[in-house]
Image: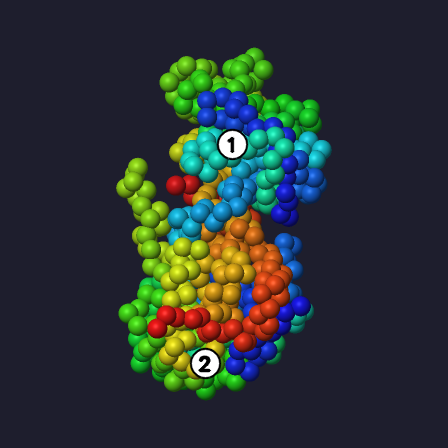
């Protein structure tokens, strides 16, 4: 047995395989198909202050080695999350990380404060400052260093739990945004959210996504995710969680070598909701076979030519 | 629902561009509830096409599942290449079923294009239960049909080009089929324009109807939130979550006609 344990901020995780926000519902929906208690962590779907119906269809389309989505942050809202979801997490062994999206700084703070004042065992918060699919969904924060630092520092004052800022690849300099979040007091950074993309049906000249643009995910974006993680790794001292196109243990190892202390599996859950557990078993074998020891010894150890 | 490795027993062309596949999938067959439900097929193990493809169940017999599918893209073409003895990774059974059981009504089963499977499945259920049913099947041309036009047995075909059965869409064929049908209830599955026409026809003639809706689908189990259809009374602009949009994969695919907005 390899040592799959990892540490993000103050929290120890049994393994580095998390499931990404928006790809696993609120965590318990897939329990019929997957042993959710074996995952490293579950990051739940973005929660906003009020419920959101989401965008009109079509919301998704498959693209080469990936897919576009424009769900529009459809969610139950923080009140229902506290009332109906948080009690379910008492039964779970897997740490829950709550993903939060807001349209203003005050709204992010209000959602976090409301959750903090409720009794819960959630391990921490991932702050979505990078959703490309809504008019007011945090993206203006994720592309601006000052706003990122200010938001992070306000949220930091409201919680002692794990605080993770989720970065967008749709920026000129992702490392600068990472540095801003670190300055604001984030415990960790997750990268990347989806890339803005488009797909067109040439037979009727219509966009395959209702509002035209969607977020690209899946194996197609893995090289972009790896590059972003490595750029941020070189710039900050806090742990990183790698996201983008992970389908197997080798992908996980790539992200770890690029600088990630954990990863999130996203689009692959749509094909197989138990893929996270398959990856955990495969990763164990892969590390053993190559005598690689602990994940923690491999973080950022990619070798570059001089 | 479960993910199961099915074994293909048979996969053959039954009409122009229409294929029928029979496979063994005991776990999914055991959980199967009725016509309307579907499976998600993982067409190939490579990640070039990450998403599964939804296919309606056309029949379940013991531990066997039958699908009838139309080739309309590269992935459905790949499914035609599956041979007997090969394995196929499938997820199911998914979704809800047509609701019936009120003997007062005669089901008028309307199918077209890729929507044939659940309708033929429902026809089989009716026949097995000794329930009289009317079958109306639409296609562009006669070569796409694999059953015969037998109005005397309440089986009506329609073709756009008039090469088989009644000329035109399914609507004139439904109208003709209703002449000898007391208290009809329409159960339909097919392409969006067909469903819309059926919905309008049912409303205009005050005939109850159930529609099995098609949607571009991601996961099939409610976690991607991709496959929505708009609800008629869900005109809430805020604070609504699933009031305005319904997830076809778990709330559907079968809806009462008056509940959803088609197209």
Q: Which residue is mark 2?
A: A238
Which residue occupies the foreground of this view, B182 or A270? A270
Rendered residue at 57%/28% (across/down): B11
User: Could you say whether the residue bearing mark 1 is in a helix, strand or loop?
Assistant: loop
Q: Are marks 2 and 1 in contact (CB under 8 Å)?
A: no
Is any atom of residue A117 visible in this view?
Answer: no
B3 vs A277: above or below: above
Rendered residue at 52%/41% (across/down): B43
B103 vs A253: above or below: above
Which residue occupies the foreground of this view, A119 or A50? A119
Packing grade of label 2 (10 A; few <14, some 14-19, many >=20) is some
Chain of the residue that carries numbered disc 1 in the rendered image:
B
Rendered residue at 60%/35% (across/down): B86
Chain of the residue that carries numbered disc 2 in the rendered image:
A
A224 vs A233: above or below: above
Q: Which residue is mark 1?
A: B81
Q: Is residue A171 found left or right of B29 in the rendered image?
A: left
Rendered residue at 39%/74% (across/down): A232
Location of residue A42 (image quadrant): bottom right
């Amino acid at each position: 047995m390899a040592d799959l344990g990892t540490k993000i901020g103050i929290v120890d995780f049994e393994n580095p395989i998390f499931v990404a926000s928006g790809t696993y519902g609120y965590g318990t929906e897939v329990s019929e198909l997957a042993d959710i208690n074996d995952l490293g962590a579950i990051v739940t779907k973005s929660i906003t202050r009020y419920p959101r119906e989401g965008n009109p269809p079509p919301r998704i389309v498959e693209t080469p080695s990936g897919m576009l989505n424009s769900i529009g942050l459809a969610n139950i809202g923080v009140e229902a999350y506290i009332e109906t979801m948080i009690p379910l997490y008492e039964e779970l062994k897997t740490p829950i990380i709550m993903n939060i999206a807001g349209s203003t700084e005050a709204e992010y703070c209000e959602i976090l404060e409301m959750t903090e004042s409720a009794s819960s065992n959630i391990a921490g918060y991932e702050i979505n400052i990078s959703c490309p699919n809504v008019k007011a969904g945090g993206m203006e924060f994720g592309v601006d260093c000052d706003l990122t630092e200010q938001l992070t520092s306000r949220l930091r004052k409201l919680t002692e739990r794990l605080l993770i800022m989720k970065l967008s690849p749709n920026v000129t300099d992702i490392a600068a945004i990472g540095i801003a979040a670190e300055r604001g007091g984030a415990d960790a950074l997750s990268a990347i959210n989806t890339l803005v993309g488009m797909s067109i049906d040439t037979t009727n000249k219509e966009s395959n996504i209702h509002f035209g643009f969607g977020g690209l995910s899946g194996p197609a974006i893995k090289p972009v995710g790896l590059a972003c993680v490595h750029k941020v790794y070189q710039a900050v001292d806090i742990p990183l969680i790698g996201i983008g196109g992970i389908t197997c243990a080798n992908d996980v190892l790539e992200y770890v070598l690029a600088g990630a202390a954990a990863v999130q599996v996203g689009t692959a859950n749509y094909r197989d909701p138990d893929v996270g557990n398959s990856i955990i078993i495969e990763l164990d074998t892969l590390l053993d076979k190559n005598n690689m020891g602990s994940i923690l010894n491999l973080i950022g150890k990619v070798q570059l030519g001089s | 629902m479960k993910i199961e490795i099915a074994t293909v027993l048979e996969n053959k062309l039954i009409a122009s561009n229409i294929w029928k596949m029979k496979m063994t999938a005991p776990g999914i067959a055991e959980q199967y509830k009725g016509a309307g439900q579907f499976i998600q097929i993982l067409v190939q193990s490579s990640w070039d096409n990450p998403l599964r493809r939804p296919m309606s169940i056309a029949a379940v017999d013991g531990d066997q599942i039958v699908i009838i599918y139309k080739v309309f893209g590269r992935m459905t073409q790949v499914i035609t290449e599956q041979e007997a003895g090969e394995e196929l990774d499938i997820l199911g059974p998914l979704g809800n079923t047509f609701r019936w059981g009120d003997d007062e009504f005669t089901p008028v089963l309307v199918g077209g294009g890729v929507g044939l499977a659940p309708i033929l499945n429902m026809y089989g259920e009716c026949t097995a239960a000794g329930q009289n049913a009317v079958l109306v099947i639409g296609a562009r041309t006669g070569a796409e049909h694999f059953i015969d036009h037998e109005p005397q047995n309440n089986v009506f075909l329609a073709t756009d080009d008039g090469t088989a059965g009644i000329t035109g869409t399914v609507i004139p064929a439904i109208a003709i089929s209703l002449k000898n049908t007391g208290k009809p209830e329409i159960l339909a599955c097919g392409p969006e324009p067909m469903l819309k026409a059926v919905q309008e026809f049912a409303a205009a003639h005050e005939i109850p109807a159930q529609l099995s809706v098609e949607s571009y689908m991601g996961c099939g189990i409610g976690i991607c939130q991709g496959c929505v259809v708009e609800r008629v009374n869900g005109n809430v602009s805020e604070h609504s979550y699933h009031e305005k949009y319904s997830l076809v994969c778990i709330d559907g695919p079968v809806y009462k006609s008056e509940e959803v907005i088609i197209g």
